[in-house]
Image: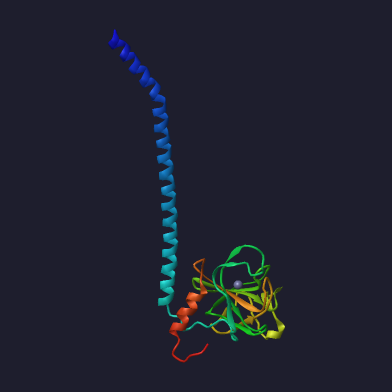
């Protein structure tokens, strides 16, 4: 009898203990799931970041190994680099950060801009931020020029850069050689002073033009001046 009572007690005890045990197990299971989910997310992000970094490194490496001897520095009257590629505080003083997809090269207003590489003019536009804009395509590369003097205009012959004082005739669809004058430095669009905003895209991805300029500079013969 005593044995039976003790058995019953033990069973009741076990029944009492069971629910908290279950809750504990469930908590552990949920905790483990969350832990692995977070770990997976971190690994996923890290891998994505690594892949992005690897792609950027690969592009930078191929840039350094490419032949840039037939390219041209894009401004004639270089003054200084006024802004680098990458994250920066908004230059107009508004709060916040933005990604600057190019470099800014300060030059006197009205001085000439040269085509970086031989290619085709694929876009002449009036953009709210970029201002009077020119895009040239050279194979997989696209070079973008912003804040030009003059305006993009349309005639029955097509779209062209209307800057009569420049003495230039630049049309959409036109083939241009590296180093030829394609426009002039201005202050159209969002600018704080005359400069060329110069952007580069390779296969649709923005590239830091500073890397390309560095590679170009390293390949120039000694004593050469742009
Ligand atoms: Zn810029």
The colour mode here is rainbow
Of all residues shown, which one is farthest toward the top?
A: 1
50 relative to 1 in the view: left or right: right
Query: Which percent across, then down, holds residue 166?
Result: 68, 85
Query: Which percent across, then down, holds residue 197?
Result: 60, 75
Ligand 1 occupies quarter: bottom right
State the quadrant of the N terminus: top left
Count of labels shown? 0
**Which residue lies at the image location 43% right of the left edge and 64% below the top edge?**
53
Query: Which percent across, then down, holds residue 213?
Result: 49, 79
**Which residue lies at the image location 65% right of the left edge and 63% below the top edge?**
95
Q: Quadrant of residue 83?
A: bottom right
Of all residues shown, which one is farthest toward the bottom?
A: 223
Q: Is residue 207 above or below residue 149?
A: above
Q: Is residue 26 above or below residue 212?
A: above
Q: Which sits in the foreground, 166 or 10?
A: 10
Q: Is residue 139 above or below residue 30?
A: below
20 relative to 114 in the view: left or right: left
166 relative to 198 in the view: left or right: right
Q: Is residue 217 above or below residue 35?
A: below
**Which residue lies at the image location 40% right of the left edge and 36% below the top edge?**
29
Q: Quadrant of residue 13?
A: top left
Query: Which percent across, then down, holds residue 19?
Result: 41, 25
Q: Quadrant of residue 85?
A: bottom right
């Amino acid at each position: 009898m005593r044995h039976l009572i003790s058995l019953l007690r033990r069973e009741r005890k076990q029944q009492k203990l069971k629910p908290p045990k279950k809750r504990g197990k469930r908590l552990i299971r949920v905790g483990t799931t969350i832990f692995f989910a977070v770990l997976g997310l971190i690994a996923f992000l890290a891998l994505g970041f690594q892949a992005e970094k690897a792609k950027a490194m690969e592009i930078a490496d191929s840039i350094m190994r490419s032949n840039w001897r037939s390219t041209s520095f894009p401004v004639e009257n270089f003054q200084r680099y006024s802004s680098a590629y990458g994250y920066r505080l908004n230059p107009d003083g508004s709060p916040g950060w933005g990604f600057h997809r190019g470099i800014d090269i300060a030059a006197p207003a009205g001085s000439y801009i040269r085509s970086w590489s031989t290619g085709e003019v694929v876009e002449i536009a009036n953009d709210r931020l970029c201002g009077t804009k020119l895009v040239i395509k050279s194979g997989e590369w696209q070079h973008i020029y912003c804040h030009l003097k003059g305006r993009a205009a349309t005639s029955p012959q097509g779209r062209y850069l209307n800057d009569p004082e420049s003495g230039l005739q630049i049309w959409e669809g036109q083939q241009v050689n590296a180093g030829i004058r394609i426009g002039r430095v201005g202050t159209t669009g969002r600018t704080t002073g005359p400069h060329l905003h110069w952007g580069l895209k390779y296969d649709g991805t923005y590239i830091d033009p500073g890397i390309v300029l560095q590679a170009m500079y390293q390949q120039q013969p000694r004593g050469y001046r742009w």
